């Protein structure tokens, strides 16, 4: 396994800090905290450089809020200067770790994502059912309280197998220990770029076990949700037990007992926002209700038109992959007449 040494200078370079600032401000250029940072841009970037170089950098306190969209989630947001630091790390480490990821790890990666996952699912479904002519099954799995249960020591051990630069490890420890939601060395907050990235690195160990140890062919993972397709219901049950044992032993995680089960593919599989049947896809009801709530907030003038238009266009691009033409038209009719789509 190739390892990387002396990459800390690349992370803290002013060139990388400038790139990180540009990425951190994307889509937020009118936010007060961005404008404030940019009033003394070069001074602020150079101050970050000095703190990183001298290893005196100390992340700020996270701002935490509750989001009910649609289920209740605790979201934590880092200060803007800390988000710049997050990007400096990911700018370098993403290139290193992405090469170790399997093809069907679809979470938070360039040219991947939910639509890639849904296309792969459709392709695997056709293969395993002989072009939708025979019976097959799916093990649909979810990891219980995933982000809350990520173990810091295990994560750092995984990272240190590739990254041999002690200063980089120091910086990562600064972030994950500051962001911990608990005092027992585990947990990462929802909402931060580093959390998404490190969560993917953490479960890469599961991906490798599934593909290379169990040699499972039809496997797709999106964050902490994953599916395995097989002609054999009994084989899926065996794999479920092996995966559960691996998660407990190696990653200190457990499968969600209610959300992890073997299902006949013809019954429709909930995955990445769609209910996937043999010949069509439906948007999950939760997804539709979420959009309807956004429309209600817009009509009550609680979301400005520019922000809502961005939300709606994103939803439309997503919804077009489902057999939902009538539903989409119905939702459009509910829009305020002041919004031009």
Image (cartoon, rainbow, N blue to C red):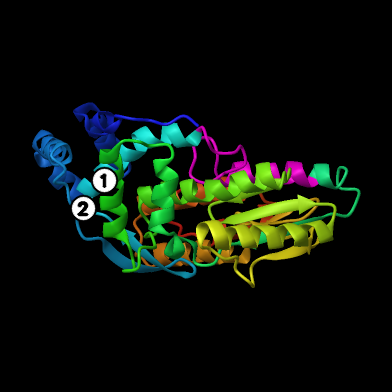
Residue 103 position within the rendered picture, expressed as x and y whole percent measured from the top left: 61, 37
Q: How many marks?
A: 2
Check contact, mark 2 vs mark 1: CB within 8 A: no
Q: What percent of the width, then of the height, locates residue 188? A: 38, 59
Nearer to the camera, 93 or 242: 242
Q: Is residue 213 left or right of residue 10?
A: right
Q: Secondary structure at mark 2?
A: loop
Which of the 4 quarters of the picture holds residue 249? bottom right
- Is residue 43 visible in the rendered structure shown here? yes
Q: Which residue is mark 2?
A: 59
- Position of residue 57 measured from the top left corner of the image (x, y, whole percent): 16, 47
- Is 88 left, or right, of 151 in this rendering? left
Q: Is residue 278 left or right of residue 8?
A: right
Q: What number is the disc on residue 170?
A: 1
Q: Residues within 10 Å of mark 2 (few under 14, many from 20)?
A: some
Tell me where the magenta segment starts and ends, as one range.
99-125
Is residue 36 shown in magenta?
no
């Amino acid at each position: 396994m190739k390892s990387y040494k002396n990459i800390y200078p690349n992370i803290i370079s002013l060139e990388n800090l400038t790139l990180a600032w540009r990425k951190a401000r994307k889509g937020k250029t009118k936010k007060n905290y961005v404008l404030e940072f940019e009033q003394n841009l070069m001074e602020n970037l150079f101050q970050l450089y000095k703190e990183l170089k001298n290893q005196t950098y100390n992340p700020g306190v996270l701002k935490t809020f509750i989001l009910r969209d649609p289920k209740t989630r605790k979201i934590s947001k880092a200060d803007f200067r800390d988000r710049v630091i997050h990007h400096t790390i990911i700018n370098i480490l993403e290139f290193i770790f992405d090469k170790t990821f399997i093809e069907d790890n679809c979470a938070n990666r360039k040219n991947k994502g939910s639509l890639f996952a849904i296309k792969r699912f459709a392709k695997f479904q056709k293969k395993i059912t002989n072009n939708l002519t025979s019976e097959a099954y799916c093990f649909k799995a979810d990891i219980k309280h995933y982000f809350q249960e990520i173990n810091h020591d295990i994560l750092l051990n995984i990272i240190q197998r590739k990254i041999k630069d002690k200063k980089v490890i120091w910086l990562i420890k600064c972030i994950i220990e500051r962001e911990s939601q608990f005092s027992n060395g585990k947990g990462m907050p929802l909402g931060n770029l580093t959390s998404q990235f490190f969560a993917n690195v953490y479960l890469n160990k599961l991906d490798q076990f599934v593909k290379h140890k169990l040699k499972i062919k039809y496997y797709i993972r999106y964050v902490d949700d994953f599916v395995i397709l097989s002609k054999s219901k009994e084989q899926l049950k065996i794999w479920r037990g092996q995966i559960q044992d691996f998660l407990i032993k190696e990653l200190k995680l457990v499968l969600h007992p209610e959300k992890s089960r073997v299902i006949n593919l013809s019954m429709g599989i909930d995955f990445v926002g769609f209910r996937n049947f043999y010949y069509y896809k439906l948007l999950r009801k939760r997804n539709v209700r979420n959009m309807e709530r956004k429309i209600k907030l817009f009509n009550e003038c609680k979301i400005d038109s520019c922000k809502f238009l961005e939300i709606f266009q994103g939803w439309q691009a997503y919804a077009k992959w489902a057999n939902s033409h009538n539903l989409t038209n119905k939702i459009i009719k509910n829009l305020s007449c002041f919004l031009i789509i």
